[in-house]
Amino acid sequence: MKIDARRLYTYPILSDGRDDYKTCKFSAAINCDFNATDLFVNVNFSTDCADLKRLIGAGKAKYLLHVECPLTLYREIFSSADENFSCNIPLNRVKRNLDCLALIVLVEDTENFSCADWNSDFEQINFNLQHGSVLAYKNFKSLMLPDDPNIFKNVASIFSVYRLVADNAPCEVDLAHDKIKIGLASKDFDLYRRYCSRPEMQPILNAMIIFPALVYIFDELKVDGGFERYDGMAWFKSLTAAFKRKKLDFNDILNEENTSIKLAQEVMDSPLTKALENVALIFDAEDS
Amino acid sequence: MEICFLKSRALDTLKNGLPQIYDKYFTQRDNSWLAEVCGENPFVKFRDVPDFELAPLDKGLGEGEILFRNCKILYKHLSFLTPRQAADERFWAGLCHGVFYDYLRRRHKHDTEEKRPTAKDIKTRFFFEATSITGIFRNSLSKCWWTGRAFYDATRSNVFEKLDIIGANDISSKISYVLRYPFTANPKILNGIVKFFEHFGAKGLGTLKNTLRPAMYELNKRGGAVVLDCLTEEEIASIMIEHVEKIFSQREQPATSKKKFFISINPNDTRTVELNSRVTVVSLRDGSRHIYKADNRLKKKFSDVFNELIGKKINSTVTLRDGKYKITDIT
């Protein structure tokens, strides 16, 4: 659930982007950590509005964290009178991302609610509000969760090579999914399948198929808006992590000096060298 | 029974090649063609489960009854799936192309000349694209599992009691009207909706489009003002009940009724509903008029309605889809 700043309420709401309150602020920060089974969310609320704090102190309102994963029909609320609280969410209940919203919500019907800090439009006005009414909110960017491709105990990779139905179609690369999908013409795929599990062939096939795909990916990311377009994809996260492991800054992709072909070689650890070494290995073995 | 999921690359091959291969879904009686198209065995074993069968397709059950039974069967036998697994396309595509390939072909009549599917139909029925809540309820099998899960209640002696309260009548519309709203993912809100169905119980909701749909719309509208998750089940139910009662009361006002059909029948009329009769019925609740053709199509698609009408005389009272009606004309 997200609350759009354009959503109209009949009474004042405290939130960034709204001017219902003159000076008061509401903010919230979340920190997440997870192990193999659970996601641990810690949320810290803060407001300087004495009237809202008074309602919370009197048990009429609460701090509330609303979490939702639309892909797994998961939706739950966690609430407290404390500014700081934690909650556990089983990872098997969520997939890919978790939408979080921090709120202050009335938990009892309240009559004659007013606040001295309200905008002059609301001067001299009191409101009778039903429990469940939103008093303050802060939207968060969706929490991106690691997609676990092993949920069926399958092999993990950010690439998926598949067979195109046509015999002589050109190779295709599709980035609009959690995996980077590389389509090979049916004859090519059959040959790929025959050799891809042979360890000595893997560096050669990587250089032939994965390397050019990766060059294409960096080209796409360098285009204006490339990061925004793909940052929700699982492969994007894995690639970011791969850069981090190599102590490289992922944002350096945008640096003009870092050409796509250079970046792809860095992240794949010199694929051409590895491939050529294996070509030599195969043919030297045949010659001897 | 061996449950398999589809390899990612096989899934990509099939989906990308759908415009070229979709005819195989109605020309091929078994799924052996998949290995040929994918260039390998497309399946990976997930686990063994005790054998089970989906609702029979040849016992005269209506569409709603089949869907209703399958919700219970699929969730009962596959309740071990985590929501995360059940939101994975590889699983549902594996089931649809594997153990239930033939069932789905027959279920959607792809096995007959009568109903040739389009590539889009195949994509909807045999694949699963859960990029949104609607995707979950589009695939033929995942729709049943997720519905079964939503209404399953382990604390009741009849674990599917809530689904029984919702009822098999027009269940497809009920799923579509209710579960497409993200807020129904909160069990407390869904329980409130079940209470709403329970309230109208035997009295029935009449035409869902005119009752359930506006009630859900009203609930969604209220959700714009308050956090629905903070309301009790009773409060959720009450919002919907009051809204529908208001709709009913507006209809019952004769002066303002837009389309009210007064019932005036000759007591000596002895006409009876036979196969292919055109039957006019008028709702005893709101005076609305409906016309059914008691033909084989009705028998196949809505056997409950067909069976209720056939053999009845003019002026008889019949119970159709949650409401009572009087037969006013037979031609």
Image (cartoon, grey):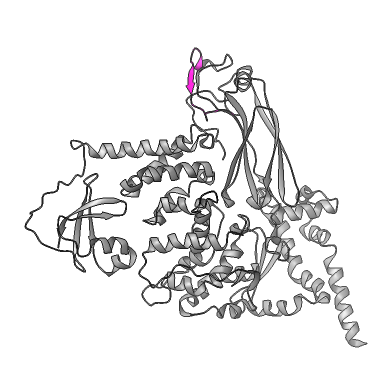
Q: Is residue B61 left or right of residue A50?
A: left
The quadrant of the rendering that contains the N terminus of chain B is: bottom right
**Above or below A190: residue A227:** above
Q: Determine the image quadrant of residue B130.
A: bottom right
**Above or below B263: residue A161:** below
Q: Residue placed farthest to the right in the image?
A: A288
Percent of width and height locating residue A225: 65, 48
Q: Is residue B223 visible?
A: yes
Q: Is residue A94 visible?
A: no
User: Can residue A133 be found in the magenta stretch?
Assistant: yes
The quadrant of the rendering that contains the C terminus of chain B is: bottom left
Percent of width and height locating residue B95: 56, 68
What residue is at 45 percent from the left and 67 percent from the top? B55
**Above or below A223: residue A112:** above
Count how many numbered circles sit on residues in the image.
Answer: 0
What span is in magenta? A122-137
Q: Determine the image quadrant of residue B186.
A: top right
Q: Residue placed farthest to the front in the image?
A: B157
Who is closer to the viewer here, A267 or A135?
A135
Percent of width and height locating residue B176: 43, 52
Q: Is residue A59 left or right of residue B58?
A: right
Who is closer to the viewer here, A66 or A138?
A66
What residue is at 85 percent from the left and 54 percent from the top? A246
Q: Determine the image quadrant of residue B108.
A: bottom left
Q: Residue placed farthest to the top in the image?
A: A124
User: Can residue B92 be found in the magenta stretch?
Assistant: no
Percent of width and height locating residue B233: 48, 38
Who is closer to the viewer here, B147 or A24?
B147
What residue is at 24 percent from the left and 45 percent from the top? B285
Q: Is residue B292 left or right of residue A29?
A: left
